[in-house]
Each structure stands twice: as structure tokens, then as C-alpha cells.
Image (cartoon, rainbow, N blue to C red):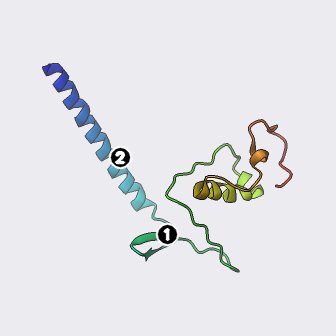
Amino acid sequence: MADIVSTVAWIVLAAVVLALIVYITAKVVEYRNPPIGNFVKVDGTTLHYVERGSGSPVLFLHGNAMVVAAGFSGHGYKFCSGIGEILADLVMYGATSHDTRLFSLSRPALAMPPSC
């Protein structure tokens, strides 16, 4: 029984040390790489915004979800700007009105979608 308690104590200690390392590392990274843009407080919620370019403003709102878009080449977003719209729809509404068959895994890899 004492061995189990000792093992659990070491595991808890290791988890606390790792959590502390992650916390400190995150703070160092945040300090070295401050966010680009500005912050504004609205109804107690802090919003981050970035102003770029000129002309009519474009505002993208998104929910509290983490989205990872992978499987595109580095320039894929440049040629298929609709990907951002599709991702925003999926985060906000769980569905999109855009035709996502163009991005199907069954589509030949070298064929360029006609809408790009």
C-alpha cells in the first residue's frame, strides 16, 4: 500500500512540475511574441482585432472553438480564399452553404478545384 501511495505522490509531483514548466514557457513565449493588433473590452469581454489595408471593413466573428485547418500547401489559402469562409461557417453554425465536395479526400490530389 505504501508503494502505491509513493508512486501516486511522484506522479502528482511530476504533473505539477510539468504544468509549471508549461505555464512558464507559455508566459515566456507570450512575452517574446506579443499579439499583433489591439484589444477592446465590450460588455466585460476582451476582443482582439487587427486593422489591415484600406477600403470597406471586413469583420470576421468566430466562436470559442479551436480550429485547425491542415492538409493544404502553404499557398493553398491564397488560391482558395473560400476556405476561411467555410471554416468560419463550420465554427459558427456547424455547417456551411459552400460546396465542400471540392475538398473531399477522394478528389485527385493534383486536380485544382474549378472555383479556385
Q: Quadrant of residue 104?
A: top right
Q: Residue at x 35, y 46 (%)?
A: 22
Q: As rendered, which of 22 and 5 lies closer to the eye? A: 5
Q: Are marks 1 and 2 in contact (CB under 8 Å)?
A: no
Residue 4 numbered tag: none
Q: Residue furthest left?
A: 2
Label 1, residues with CA under 10 Å away: few <14, some 14-19, many ≥20: few
- Residue 115, given in percent of the width and then of the height, sits at 83, 55
Q: Residue at x 56, y 51 (%)?
A: 67
Residue 22 numbered tag: 2
Quadrant, the C terminus: bottom right
Q: Which residue is under mark 1?
A: 48
| Left or right, residue 10 beside residue 106 | left
- Residue 109, given in percent of the width and then of the height, sits at 79, 38
- Secondary structure beneath dot 2 equals helix
Q: Residue at x 73, y 56 (%)?
A: 97
| Left or right, residue 104 beside residue 39 | right
Q: Residue at x 42, y 55 (%)?
A: 29
Q: As rendered, which of 74 and 57 lies closer to the eye? A: 57
Choose the circle earlier in sequence order: 1 or 2: 2
Q: As rendered, which of 57 and 34 lies closer to the eye? A: 57
Looking at the rendered structure, the kind of residue marked 1 is His
- Which marked residue is nearer to the observer: mark 1 or mark 2? 1
| Left or right, residue 109 beside residue 70 | right
| Left or right, residue 71 beside residue 17 | right
Q: Quadrant of residue 88?
A: bottom right
Q: Is residue 65 above or below residue 35?
A: above
Looking at the rendered structure, the kind of residue marked 2 is Val
- Residue 1, given in percent of the width and then of the height, sits at 14, 19
Label 2, residues with CA under 10 Å away: few <14, some 14-19, many ≥20: few
- Secondary structure beneath dot 1 equals strand
